[in-house]
Image (cartoon, rainbow, N blue to C red):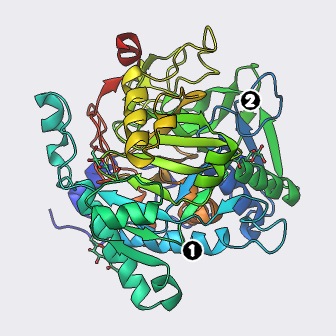
């Protein structure tokens, strides 16, 4: 059969046998109503960008988020990953596209002249960030099965490879930007790392500091974002839990809430972070992983001694320390994390109208979903607490801190993808459904620009490069997702319940 001019390759046609009307071949026309599920950094930034675009001036915009019953109307829910004392704002990546996006966001974070500027009022702290790596490769995933599953992915980078690639990229930018050049410095050996950290600790083999990076108060930034959304007067905020998506044939028509109410919309955007897999089967593209955090109370004098240290992130282990404010030091681990397979009371939307939905999906376990039976019951596995403590001893080797208990520990739930690229695309087999998730633990820094980029994907404008990176990818069905971007240490496939029980 002779191929017609209109047909693409048979492989491409086979990949989306029943592409809905929203597929990329048709011009975009704005819907008259739009529902965003999730008021985290993806959902709220998208709502703000939509409210500011002329094309959506006649579109009604609703955002729904789970809410703490004791704090009605709290957006986002207090156990959301976007709500925390701090998030690292890293300016550079091994990947040039994210480095460029990070630069765009930094310009906004740096604005602090007016109280309403994003970086003002203690929201942004330009403390500097040290990235270090060590020569040994990250620990292999446990078991042969998992090893073979990850074989199809790009070759693993070690933490050191990643740090060097990231340095190469930021150096290339600095060659064109003297202001940046003055703010970055290679730390070629353990002594240089110790000198830059200023605590007496830190002994990675190689690293660099970017004094343009730093950290932000995530809770305060989300409150700022919510204020901006409210100011538009365009967005209807609903506090309730979505239990399932509503559908009519192959079209998504809205969402059912736990109160029984149904919200209808022409277009539904699911931006529910690590909870997304409970609403939509993401078919091996995304998995919820829990990452450990610990908070330690400090004395006034420890606070003042540590107030001006940079953030340090060890890319070999994923362990990091954020300088303290209010006499609280935060330690965390950006690693492969724990998975939490959970039987689902409501089946998620299957990956196509003719498929069946999974019955179990990894979902967050938080202090709201599982209130601790006593204030001292562990929220993270003992293995995690030990790992945080070992890192603290290496990075701040002060005897007074070594045995001090953490005042609080917590799991921060990532929506992880195999490449750490976000998933921002129309669902290929359901009409009226757009997905914006897959943060992979590195999205918060993009808060100032993320919503605009998501709406660019929605209307199919802007950089095709990001649309390509963030596209829906079939073919992952039945595979365990393991993030292999070079920034994750630790083992894959640890099951939270088992680890909690063994500690
Ligand atoms: C950034 O690093 C990657 C390697 O990870 C390299 O391919 C790319 O060319 C670098 N970009 C710049 C601007 O140096
Ligand atoms: C990073 O972690 C590795 C492995 O645990 C350790 O050998 C190294 O000293 C750490 N680097 C820093 C700066 O703490
Ligand atoms: C972050 O901001 C919140 C809300 O504005 C505030 O209560 C909290 O003390 C701040 N935390 C830090 C670490 O600055």
**Residue 482: which quarter of the image?**
top left
Q: Is residue 275 left or right of residue 353?
A: right
The image position of residue 130, as x and y in percent, is: 43, 62
Q: CA distance from mark 2 to mark 1?
A: 32 Å
**Residue 454: which quarter of the image?**
bottom right
Q: Residues within 10 Å of mark 2 (few under 14, many from 20)?
A: many
| Foreground pick, 77 / 207 | 207
Q: Is residue 448 left or right of residue 480?
A: right
**Residue 288: which quarter of the image?**
top left
Q: Quadrant of the N terminus?
A: bottom left
Q: Is residue 43 left or right of residue 57?
A: left
Can residue 423 be seen in this snapshot? yes
| Foreground pick, 267 / 49 | 49
Can residue 440 be seen in this snapshot? no
Mark found first going from the N terminus, 2 or 1? 2
Please, what secondary structure does the residue beneath circle 1 have? helix
Q: State the residue position of label 2.
A: 67
Q: Is residue 76 left or right of residue 190?
A: right
The image position of residue 208, as x and y in percent, is: 37, 68
Q: State the residue position of label 1.
A: 104
């Amino acid at each position: 059969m002779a191929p017609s001019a209109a047909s693409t390759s048979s492989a491409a046609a086979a990949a989306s046998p029943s592409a809905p009307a929203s597929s990329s071949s048709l011009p975009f026309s704005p819907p008259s109503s739009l529902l965003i599920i999730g008021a985290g950094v993806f959902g709220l930034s998208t709502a703000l960008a939509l409210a500011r675009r002329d094309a959506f001036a006649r579109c009604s915009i609703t955002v729904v988020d789970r809410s703490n019953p004791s704090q009605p109307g709290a957006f986002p829910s207090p156990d959301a990953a976007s709500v925390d004392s701090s998030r690292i704002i890293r300016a550079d990546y091994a990947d040039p596209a994210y480095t460029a996006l990070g630069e765009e966001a930094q310009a906004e974070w740096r604005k602090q002249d007016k109280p309403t500027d994003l970086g003002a009022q203690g929201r942004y702290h330009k403390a500097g960030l040290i990235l270090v790596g060590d020569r040994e490769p990250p620990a292999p995933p446990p078991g042969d099965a998992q090893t073979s599953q990850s074989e199809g992915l790009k070759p693993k980078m070690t933490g050191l490879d990643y740090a060097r690639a990231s340095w190469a990229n930021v150096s290339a930018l600095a060659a064109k930007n003297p202001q940046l050049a003055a703010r970055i410095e290679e730390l070629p050996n353990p002594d240089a790392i110790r000198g830059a950290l200023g605590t007496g600790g830190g002994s990675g083999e190689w690293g660099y500091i970017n004094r343009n990076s730093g950290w932000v108060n995530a809770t305060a930034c989300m409150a700022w974002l919510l204020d901006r959304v409210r100011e538009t007067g365009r967005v209807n905020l609903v506090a309730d839990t979505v239990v399932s998506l509503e559908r009519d044939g192959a079209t998504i028509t809205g969402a059912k809430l736990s109160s029984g109410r149904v919200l209808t919309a022409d277009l539904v955007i699911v931006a529910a972070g690590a909870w997304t897999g409970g609403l939509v089967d993401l078919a091996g593209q995304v998995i919820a992983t829990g990452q450990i955090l610990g908070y330690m109370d400090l004395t006034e004098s420890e606070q003042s001694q540590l107030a001006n240290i940079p953030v340090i992130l060890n890319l070999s282990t994923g362990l990091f320390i954020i300088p303290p404010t209010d006499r609280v030091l935060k330690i965390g681990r950006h690693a492969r994390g724990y998975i939490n397979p959970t039987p689902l009371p409501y089946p998620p939307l299957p990956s196509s109208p003719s498929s069946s939905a999974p019955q179990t999906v990894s979902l967050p376990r938080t202090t709201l979903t599982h209130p601790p039976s006593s204030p001292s019951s562990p929220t993270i596995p003992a293995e995690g607490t030990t790992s945080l403590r070992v890192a603290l001893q290496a990075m701040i080797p002060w005897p007074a801190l070594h045995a001090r208990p953490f005042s609080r520990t917590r799991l921060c739930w990532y929506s992880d993808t195999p490449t750490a690229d976000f998933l921002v695309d129309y669902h290929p087999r359901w009409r009226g459904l757009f997905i914006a998730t897959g943060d992979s633990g590195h999205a918060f820094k993009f808060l100032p620009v993320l919503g605009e980029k998501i709406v660019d994907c929605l209307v199919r404008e802007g950089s095709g490069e990001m649309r390509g990176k963030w596209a829906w990818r079939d073919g992952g069905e039945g595979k365990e997702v393991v993030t292999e971007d070079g920034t994750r240490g630790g083992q894959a496939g640890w099951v939270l319940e088992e680890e909690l029980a063994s500690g």
